[in-house]
Image: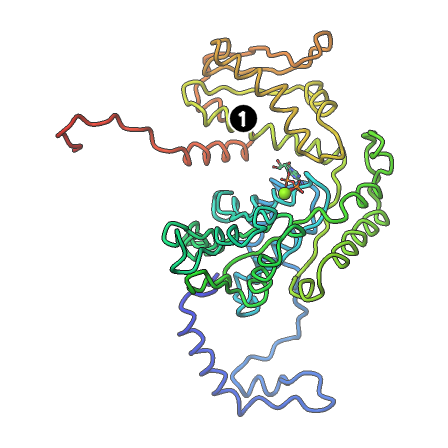
Amino acid sequence: MRRAGAGKETELGDAMRVLDAAAPVAPALGEGRRFPFSRKTNARAGGRPVTPEVLDPRRTGSEALELEEGLRALVVGQEEAIRQIVDVYQMYLTGLCPPQRPVANLLFLGPTGTGKTRIVEAAAETLVGTSRAVIKVDCAEFQHSHEIAKLIGSPPGYLGHRETHPLLSQEVLNQYHTDRVKLSFVLFDEIEKASDALWNLLLGILDKATLTLGDNRKVDFSRAMIFMTSNLGAAEMQSLVSPRLGCGSSAPPAHDERTEGRIRRSGIEAARKKFTPEFMNRLDKVVVFRPLGEGELRRILDIELGFVQQRVLAASAERAFVFRLTEEAKDALLADGVDLRYGARHLKRSIERMLVQPMSNLIATGQVRGGDVLRVDWDAEQSCLQFVREEEGVPVQALAEMLEPRVRSWARAAVAAQPAPQKAPLARGSRRI
Ligand SMILES: Nc1ncnc2c1ncn2[C@@H]1O[C@H](COP(=O)(O)OP(=O)(O)OP(=O)(O)O)[C@@H](O)[C@H]1O
Ligand SMILES: [Mg+2]
């Protein structure tokens, strides 16, 4: 597929010439006419008459489909957010995004730990290969004018003008562009905490896709996806899903269409109350993230276990081993880690405490060695995970074969992203050859 921006001027010039040439032939859209080009006219203009065919605008191109699959592998249960990101990416690819605006202005609302930040990282990982490409602005940290200078730099003449490197410069924005994808990902977190100065800056970016730095340089955001997150209305949403949660219950939330609709409305209502119409008008979409239920947390557990396996493989090639959890062990992690008030955050803490920390003890004491295959079970008597070696001396290649394909590819990416091993310092006067 031809990419937006590639040889834009010449293509545009060609297209305009073709349109100019066609103009005298194209009839004006008159009163009562449904469609400007009749089949006869088409034929006259060089077109080929065909049997009218209804087209399917719901199908996405292969690259957008790849993004969708990438997001689905990493983000659980937030279909609407995935849909929005894929849709704007498709528009970006075909060059149909509105001009002089960011590629997308999306506001994500919803309870803590439901994937608002994760989905932005996942989009960056899938499209440009690393979540570090996300430029994150914690709005709560930019309350005073000197803090705004960290974002846009201070005007010339101010003390320290040369030393401050603005966080939102064009270089930072373009840093992770690849030959394939020239997109930036900017995330304004907790926007309800933004100061007035930051707010004005944000409105300018959302509206005109430009930002003026302290030294008057302009930054172009027309190749950026702008994400904003807020926990506004999260408490009300959570109480709609599981009214007893406030009393410490972790009963699974009821997800039906009516509840989902009410959650959405309460989120949007909270945003309308807090934010000005001029801000709301600049948004392409407000997406309300659903509180996660137990089934979703179970799927997130599998994803997170894959990341732990990736860490094990990336940590050291000589000490690479594979572990597998029994269903009982997974149940135990879920029982400990499911607190629906904190979404998946709590589950991640349980994984670190119950699995990763003991495993690092096993590595440090040489009880687990490279080439081992471990079974991780639940020891009900001791109330902890039990680690059992089932095989040893398995070659790395064979270990890799045991992994799910997606974990294998994450591990490969993690190894590739590792910094090259430090070369030994050279003796004075010597040089490398
Ligand atoms: N829907 C999800 N799918 C997959 N992983 C998730 C999901 N939600 C949360 N997680 C996991 O939990 C972690 C925390 O989630 P995340 O940072 O996205 O929360 P958040 O919605 O941004 O919360 P907060 O409002 O507190 O910033 C993520 O790093 C990810 O590992
Ligand atoms: Mg977040």
Q: What residue type is labelled 1?
A: Gln
Image vertical order of residue 402 relative to residue 128, above or below: above
At 74% from the left and 23% from the top, the residue drawn is: 335
Ligand 2 resides in the quarter of the picture at top right
Relative horizontal placement of residue 332, taking residue 26 as reference (left or right): right
Residue that label 1 marks: 309
Image vertical order of residue 27 relative to residue 330, above or below: below
Q: In which quarter of the image is residue 87?
A: bottom right
Mark 1, Cα crowd under 10 Å, few <14 / some 14-19 / many 20+, is: many
Front-most of residues 262 and 375:
262
On-image quarter of the C terminus: top left
Q: Position of residue 255 (x, y in %)?
A: 82, 42
Q: Position of residue 343 (x, y in %)?
A: 71, 35
Q: Where is residue 265 in the image (x, y as percent from the top left)?
A: 81, 54
> How many marks on residues?
1
Image vertical order of residue 351 relative to residue 148, above or below: above
Relative horizontal placement of residue 428, taking residue 104 as reference (left or right): left
Image vertical order of residue 280 relative to residue 49, above or below: above
Q: Quadrant of residue 36?
A: bottom right
Relative horizontal placement of residue 156, taking residue 25 as reference (left or right): left
At 60% from the left and 63% from the top, the residue drawn is: 203
Q: Where is residue 180 in the image (x, y as percent from the top left)?
A: 44, 54
Circle 1 SS class: helix
Front-most of residues 211 and 241:
211
How has the structure been colored for display?
rainbow
At 66% from the left and 88% from the top, the residue drawn is: 29
